[in-house]
Image: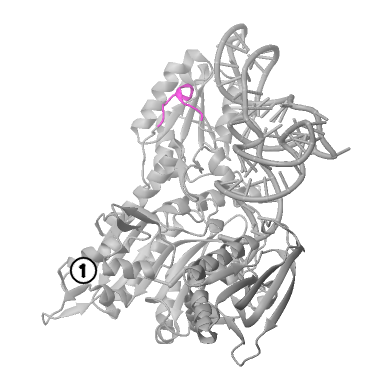
Amino acid sequence: MRLLLIHADYIEYAPLQPAIKEPEKIENIGKYERVDECLVAFCTIEKIDEENPEEIVKLATEAIIEHVKMVKANRVVVYPYAHLSSDLASPKNAIKILHKLKEELEKIIEVKLAPFGWYKTFTLKCKGHPLSELSRTIVPKEEKKKEEKHIPSSFLILTPDGKEIPIDLSNPNTFLNLDIDPTLIKLIKNEAGIKEKHQAPAHIKIMKKLELIDYEPASDVGHFRFYPKGMIIKTALEEFANNFAIKELKAMRIETPMIYKLDEPDIAEQASRFKEKDYRLKVDNKEFILRFAGDFGLFRMMKDAIMSYKQLPIRVYELSPSFRLEQSGECVGLKRLRAFTMPDIHCFCKNLEEGLLEYKLLFEKYTEFTNSMEIEYAIAFRVVKEFYLKNKEWIVSLLKIANKPALIEILPEMKHYWILKHEYQAIDSTGGNIQLATLQLDVEDAARYGIYYVDENGEKKGCIILHSSMGSIERWIGVILEQAAKDMENNKVPKLPLWLSPIQVRIIPVNMNYLDKAIEIALKINENNIRADVDDRNESVAKKIRDAETEWIPYIVVLGEKEVSTGELSVRIRGEGIVSKKLEELIEEINKKISSKPRVPLCLPIRLSARPSFK
RNA sequence: GCCCCAGUAGCUCAGCUGGUAGAGCGACGGCCUUGUAAGCCGUUGGUCAGGGGUUCAAAUCCCCUCUGGGGCUCCA
């Protein structure tokens, strides 16, 4: 907010004609107001004021009152005056803030507020003493801090054979024509703010068309409803996350509450570092916060845990919903939500040396995990300069595991709680990136939240904490659908990975005479933990095939006289064609393809005619 | 959160220089008994996102709200 304060004998003004589309309503155009012995505050509301109107009003009130006392003015005239800044707030908000300012001042002194949004004529007699003219700029305190903190990062590409290619994000020539992984180039373009397609991500239409997931307007922005088929995919991914953490990494699974009291110091501390992106609620006069990450409950639990150096590294896993009040304009489809399901694995290590061993192990596991998901992705590291210089060869050894070059962001100094992190980023159908798995090396939080282990000498020591996640389940669904959309664009038949296809096999009886046999076959397939159903609707075979194809069903079996008499099924494989197979061969093929991926049972009526349509 | 664009039947959309709505698909009913991407006939279907305003008259013009999309901003 900009203020120009004038101590005046009098001011006289009258609104003449509207200056904006929606000016404040006034009673008499052209009617003069006169105020004597006053401090006139010419006042410009700036864009930045919209972020924290309360604070701005408070600071402005203080500044005006301070000056009123100094010059001993009897009253204040707040005079909207757009011309003190070139970065204006929206008129709607400016009016709100000005009225708020009037309200606050009124508690202390007589105030007049000139109408907003009018061209006004005015006469002003300035007293002319040394303190009679003064200008002030009011800026939110937080904003000031932010500006001071900002030191730019530098960027480079690091290859598995240890080559460093410095790049400059503000100069696309330094990276656009490099002969290197095209997916990484796309990631860097995103990082540099170069966007190729300005359109809605394709997964939104697909998730509705396939009856997986949809918006729920009765909820808040970024909260979705999951239909039965969407639930199959979500459950399968969750089970995959469980298997990864529990079977693969031998982590201990826990669960912690979703709601926390804000007056607990450590909770308040974590909340304050997350700005205003949290959901708050008041119950029984107590203020609560909805968890925006798993750390709340986990850190409390680990603070109380007694850990010996002999037990480390200790891995803890939690899968649970988190809530973040992301800016409404940022919530798009499944890319960014306000409610999401997050698998979290935290590893508690003795020291940096053990932390690095653990990091490398997790890097290998997460890379293997991401590779198995049939998507296009690139890796980005963020690392504090000092750490990078000491450990460059170690990072190269990670890249050798992934066999991919990576973007490296080098932070001149420690800015967050971690000294090293990396992300797996998928590229969507519009060329935008979607962050998936991430791994962070945290050297600060153990001390901050009192998480200790007891060392060889019986002394308490702070842990090194590795935070890691495969990324939210919802995002993974989005990315898998985006991958299908990209295939479609490249004239490939769009598919879901077999293990995630809600219906894996559809049996189509040629007519009602073969319905019983069809159901018998479907049940047999289901017994093998493969999801099969039967299209028993009274439609032509052609129609049923068409519907199965538009549902992206990977295996379609047509059942008629021929099949029943020979025992050879006619199997239409999505994107490939029709082959002849015995039932056992079909089951074997699917089992082989799904391999160790999770098997979620069919949670729908086996007969299509028994299902409602959710579209 | 800000700026811009959009919202018409369950779905996809037409109508939008003002005269209170239409198609295809779906659903429902019937006929057909089906062999690898839509068999035929009929019926049903709407507070034109919600609210307010202008007007004799609003889906159509104006304002507000909600929801979605694009672009910013933000993402310890």
State whether residue A327 is above or below residue A395: above
Identify whether A305 is placed above or below A232.
below
- Residue found farthest to the left: A458
Q: Residue at x 58, y 28 (%)?
A: A545
Location of residue A347 in the rendering, given as x and y in whole percent from the top left corner: 28, 67
Please tell me how many numbered marks the rendered image carries: 1
For numbered disc 1, what is the local secondary structure? helix
Residue visible at 50% across and 34% down in the picture? A555
Q: Which residues are magenta?
A: A604-613
Residue type marked 1: Lys
Say which chain tag 1 marks.
A
Q: Residue A312: image x %, image y %?
A: 21, 71
Q: Which of the pair A54/A425 is nearer the observer?
A: A54
Q: Against B24, is A165 above or below? A: below
- Residue A371 seen in render: yes
Left or right position of A248 against A192: left
Residue A67 at x, y = what percent? 53, 83
Q: Give the main secondary structure, helix, strand or loop, of the magenta stretch.
A: loop
Compare residues A517 and A598 and report the one nearer the observer: A598
Q: Can residue A404 be seen? A: no
User: Toward the viewer: A327 or A606?
Assistant: A327
Of residue A400 and residue A472, the one placed in the foreground of this image is A472
Instruction: Name the image quarter holding residue A50.
Output: bottom right
**Which residue matches tag 1?**
A303
Q: Residue at x 45, y 73 (%)?
A: A399
**Image quadrant occupied by the C terminus of chain A:** top right
Q: Residues within 10 Å of mark 1 (few under 14, many from 20)?
A: some
Q: Quadrant of residue A354?
A: bottom left
Q: Would you say residue A382 sits in the magenta stretch?
A: no
Q: Residue at x 29, y 80 (%)?
A: A353
Q: Quadrant of the N terminus of chain A?
A: bottom right
